[in-house]
Structure formats: structure tokens, C-alpha cells
Image: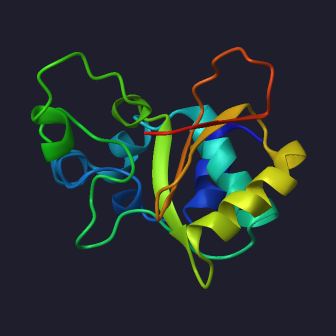
Amino acid sequence: MNRKELIEKIKTKFSIEELVCKHIAEGYDEKTAWMFLDDKLLETLYALRFNILCKPITVNTSLLHERGIRCNRCDTVKGKNKVYMSAHVLGKAIDFNVEDMDAEEARNIIKEKAYMLPYNVRIENNVSWIHIDVYDNLSGNKITTFNG
């Protein structure tokens, strides 16, 4: 499916405010804000929500608003005093939780169904949420895990 079709399908389950930081949501109209999200991330999010986990996924909430794309005004970013090349700032990562599932259970399902992922991804270990990004470290592995 093309990008427009993909976004229309994702919009049935996610608002743009759930996927971008509050600064982007407040500073750009919806149509513009979607352009900051990487196609590979959107395809991966689609696969996770509709084909792999098949349950509601929560990215940003009213209290947690830097779990999708982060901008230069976000606390997580502006507090850095070294080069910060997180996949979040490039629209290539999300942190999320899955309804009625703990993070380890969700990570295990994603690993079991890795063949359904459209791209190689990285998943963070040992956190109470799921971090997934579409950085490809050229390992050849569908999933690479890392400690943050």
C-alpha cells in the first residue's frame, strides 16, 4: 500500500497526537505532522497493531508525550549535552505498551512473529515498555536487541 493508504489505515487506531510529541502536535496541523514519521516506522507500526500483536497499542498519553517522535524542545532531547541521534528524533522509533500484556510478553510475541515484520528492527531489553525502531545495524537479523 502507498503512504497515503497506510496513514489512512493507521489513523483508524491512532491519532497523530499519539505518535508525535506535544510540541509537534501543537505547532503543526495534522497533515503536516504525519510527514515527520518515517515510512518504515509506519509500516512496522501497522504490522504490530494489525498482524502481530493484534491488540490496542498505547504510545503517547496525557502524561507520557515523548514516546513517539521527539523534537528539539522535548525535555529528553534538550537536556542532552552530547550528540543525540536517537531514532525518536528522526521519526524512526516508538515506545509503547500493549493492552492486557506486559512488555516482556509483547517482546516475546514480536520475536516469535519476526517474519511478519516488514523491516529489520531494534528492540530495547529490560524496560517496562516496548521500544522499537527501524534503525538497521546491518547485522542481517530481523530483530536486534539492545540495552538502553
Task: Decide if residue 124 is on the left or right side of residue 53.
Answer: left
Where is residue 73 shown, x and y percent of the image?
12, 39
Q: Please say if 89 is above or below 114.
A: above
* Quarter of the figure with residue 26: bottom left
Residue in view at x 10 percent, y 35 percent: 79
* Quarter of the figure with residue 16: bottom left
Residue in view at x 28 percent, y 52 percent: 66
Where is residue 65 shown, x and y percent of the image?
27, 59
Q: Quadrant of the C terminus?
A: top left
Residue in view at x 51 percent, y 54 percent: 126
Towards the viewer: 30 or 66: 66
Towards the viewer: 28 or 57: 57
Residue 13 visible in this rendered orientation of the protein: no
Q: Quadrant of the N terminus?
A: top right
Where is residue 24 shown, x and y percent of the image?
23, 46
Task: Decide if residue 56 is on the left or right side of residue 64.
Answer: right
